[in-house]
Image (cartoon, rainbow, N blue to C red):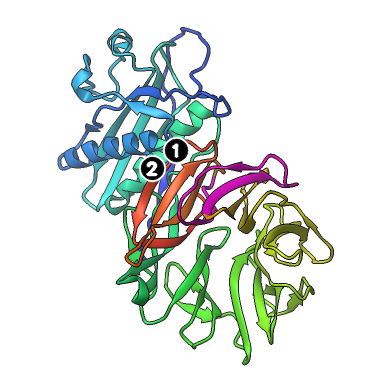
Amino acid sequence: MMKMLLTCLAFVMAVSAVQAEPLRIELDSPNIEPLPFAAPAFIAESAGADQYARDLAAVVSSDLQGSGLFRAISQDAFISQITSFDSPVQYADWKAINAQALITGAVTTTGDGQIVVKFRLFDVFSEDQMGEGLQFVGSTNGWRRMAHKVADAVYSRITGEGGYFDSRVVYVSETGPKNARLKRLGIMDYDGANQQFLTDAQAIVLAPRFSPNGDRVIYTSYESGFPKIYVLDVASVGRRVLQDQPGTMSFAPRFAPNGQDVVFSLTTGSNTDIYKLNLDSGQRTQLTTSPAIETAPSYSPDGTQIVFESDRSGTQQLYVMSAGGGEATRISFGQGRYGTPVWSPRGDLIAFTKQNRGRFHIGVMRTDGSGERLLTASFLDEGPTWSPNGRVIMFTRETAGSGGSSTLYSVDISGRNLKAVQAQASDPSWSPLLK
């Protein structure tokens, strides 16, 4: 895997003395109107930078519009043209086309394969620059990452929350007919760009999950004929089996927030329980002892609790227990069956899959089970994963029939902005923001 060194520098520009209420999107508002913004092509400040200048602005616009919170104004409507990164902003021209935010940028390429990207964000109606300008330096191969970083900065300054565009998703790529589908691990940018494969298609792979810092992926593979858990280094693509005990099946792994412990399900005989394994010492601890099937564990962000699914009550439901095991508390009580719970990185919600009356849903609830909300409904929706800022959920949607296929979708936690992300794919896991 190619590594890219990306540095970020801040610079300050004198701003207008006009004072007004800051430009802000209130994410908890029940009725959010997309905020209109203008993102002219960045200024090419060196020979050979013209294409990067156009592409960077296009990706920034795509990121922001894709969030459902912003609306790009067509360049055909522009009255002013940005001809220099340091030229004064003609605010009246941008007000005339109802642009509330203006994004300007500049690009320089160097002879050693490096690229320098600068940007500024302006509140048009306040006639003010929002925060410091930023400068990113890195390899020309990483220009898309720089665009994502610009979009993250814009998103954060206008919403007041962290961004999520400069991130990746690991998933299971699926090709071939449904009854003989080939599966291998893939990794891509959050928006489906820059796809690469981490494994071949010689064995079935399931449920890849990122480590807390995004450097490793843990997943289940059937290459031995039985499900076993593997840990893969994303940069080197080197991997190792987590445990290889004859007569057992291990699956549904997930990292703890400390990155050193792994929680997973282990089947011995006819019983399936949840265990914890320390990657350094190899010490294994059994966390549940119920005769029921206990699986799909997920840690809280502070590492003190685990949510999981179990049929100990007679139907598939969600439970929360201490990270050290012990007594568990049921938190799901609605109609239907609940599974694949995942704790939000913000710590406030748990996402889940729900099956009821022949339909599948992706939903969220508070960590005590209250406030359940269903965000989707289809023939088969399952396997939610959270964006780094806890505002968006990605999941698998499968169509019905013998020729049905799996597609990755995303949806805002409000239930808005449902959209397809990647076809012929399943089991997504969202990385943290890249460093």
Q: CA distance from mark 1 to mark 2?
A: 6 Å
In front: 398, or 183?
398
- List x then y, in percent, for residue 245: 63, 89
Q: Residue furthest bottom?
A: 246
Q: Position of residue 30 (x, y in %)?
A: 55, 25
Residue position marked by numbered label 1 in the rendering: 152
Residue corresponding to mark 2: 148
Q: Which residues are magenta?
A: 359-388
Quadrant, the N terminus: bottom left
Question: Residue 295 occupies which quadrant of the picture?
Answer: bottom right
In the image, farthest residue toward the right: 327
Q: Is residue 148 above or below residue 303?
A: above
Residue 279, position as x, y percentages in the image? 64, 75
Q: How many numbered marks appear?
A: 2
Residue 83 painted magenta: no
- The three-letter code of the residue at mark 2 reads His
Whether pointer 1 and pointer 2 mark residues with C-beta atoms closer than 8 Å, the reply is yes
**In the image, farthest residue toward the front:** 357
Q: Is residue 129 left or right of residue 141?
A: right
Count neighbours of disc 2 (C-alpha within 10 A) and say few if under 14, some if 14 to 19, many if 20 or more. many
Q: Is residue 223 above or below residue 295?
A: below
Q: Amino acid at mark 1?
A: Asp
Density class for disc 1 (Cα within 10 Å; few <14, some 14-19, many ≥20) is: many
Q: Is residue 22 left or right of residue 314?
A: left
Residue 435 in view (yes/no): no
Residue toward you, 9 or 198:
198
